[in-house]
Image (cartoon, grey):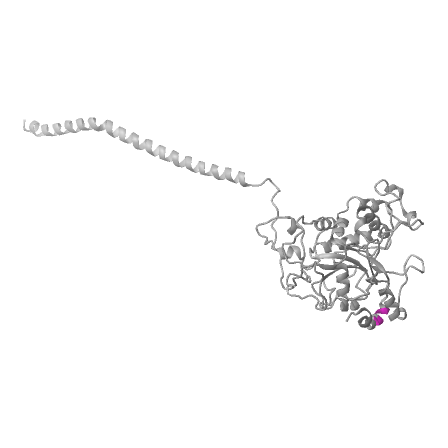
Amino acid sequence: MKSSNNQHPLNSVSKHFNLQLVRFLPYLLFLAFGVTIGIIISFYLKSFSLQHTQFLHSSSSQINAPPPNTMPPPIEKPEVSDSNLNQEGPEEFTPPSNVVHNTQESIQPSIVVHDTKKFIQPSNHVVHNMKEFIHPSNVVHDMSDEELLWRASMTPKIREYPFDRVAKVAFMFLVRGPVPLAIFWERFFKGHEGYYSIYVHSNPSYNGSDPESSVFHGRRIPSKKVEWGKFNMIEAERRLLANALLDFSNQRFILISESCIPLFNFSTIYSYLMNSTQSYVMAYDEDSLVGRGRYNPRMSPMVTLKQWRKGSQWFEMDRELALEVVSDKTYFPIFQEHCTRPCYADEHYLPTFVNIMFPEKNSNRSLTWVDWSKGGLHPTKYVRPEVTVAFLENLRNQKCEYNGQAYTNACFLFARKFLPTSLTRLMRFSPSVMHIQ
């Protein structure tokens, strides 16, 4: 009995605990179920958020990415030098009133390589420098002739320049090697920096160089082989024009041979050209074997016999005409195909082209004197004994029409052919006759 009485409270407690456990069991199960659901939902939301972020990133990348193979290659920042911006122009003459002068913006170019890609491909890494665009700092580039002519043919439609501009004369030397009369030309250009540009087309096989002090130093353009009487002579002329057109300050363009000399000083020639209203491409109709006899009927109907003209190779033209020459895709191919010997393109292409397209803007004469009186395929050559004061004065005083109406005694500004042996006398007479000091 004693034992039985002692165990009764334990049984009572056990029953009470079991009853409470049974009562709270549903709540415990509900709590466990809720926690499990919460964990599952939390994991699911986290996974969904990660996938959504990846999806948005992937979608954004696909939207912003350009099509394959369309992204331009990186472009290096062009080097621009301002070391040549402080050169002064000539002091002994007053430039024409229609020319704006600011010698701080006038540049005598130095040497920097032009890359055509820098002109046509935009990049966030390129500093677009206006001075480099309007005053190319060098004539060296890696453009093909096709790229060069395309680049040079560009012209702004707004005629007013948004910068101070000094109009320059581009002297384009077509030579085989060095400029034979360079010393004489050095004297001619001295003191007039900023009012001229120089471009030299030499045979690509020529490896010589000019002293750094020379005005011809670094002025050789990328050139190709030129043969007398061949069409590549015209290609060389257009190559010179195209390179000169890259400088927006070049307003007049004169083709100079290796045996050519100036008959007047720089001031006179500069004023003469800047005040001229016409270009100087000799063009005339000659009914002979060396005139109309060189016409190829296959050029018809684009070029007819009535339009056919002959003239001197040595031209001078303004910027407007120079742009048309380098842009010509109509007559140039016709002459390239059909003007072969006995047709000499350098005597017929430009005279015919200008006669057809711009007859009213042309004087129909050349500014370069030459003597054909002895006949033959080449003009008279002048050596030392033939260069006299009287001879040079005679060349400087020949009457010509100027600007379509007024007459002047400065008919020719240049003359050829003078051989290197004539250099000593030219240097001696130039101060007193040509006023070239």
| 205 vs 359: above or below | below
| Along the viewing direction, whichever of 194 and 329 lies nearer the viewer | 194
Which range of residues does the magenta coloring cover?
421-425
Secondary structure mostly seen in magenta is: helix
The quadrant in which residue 410 appears is bottom right
| Image position of 87 with respect to 355: above or below | below
Residue 276 appears in which quarter of the rendering? bottom right
Residue 345 spot, x, y in % from top left: 85, 50
Query: Residue 175: horizontal and vertical position, in percent?
Result: 81, 60
Q: Nearer the viewer, residue 416 or 410?
A: 410
When the figure is inspected, residue 160 is found, relative to residue 392, above or below; the finding is above
Residue 197 in the figure: left or right of residue 28 = right
User: Do we see residue 204 in this rendering?
Assistant: no
Q: Residue at x 75, y 47 (%)?
A: 327
Q: Residue at x 61, y 42 (%)?
A: 70
Residue that lies at the very extreme toward the left in this rendered image: 1
> The N terminus lies in which quarter of the figure?
top left
Q: Residue at x 89, y 64 (%)?
A: 381
Q: Is residue 237 left or right of residue 151?
A: right
Question: Which residue shows up at 45% across the image and 38% down it?
Answer: 53
Residue 404, position as x, y percentages in the image: 81, 54
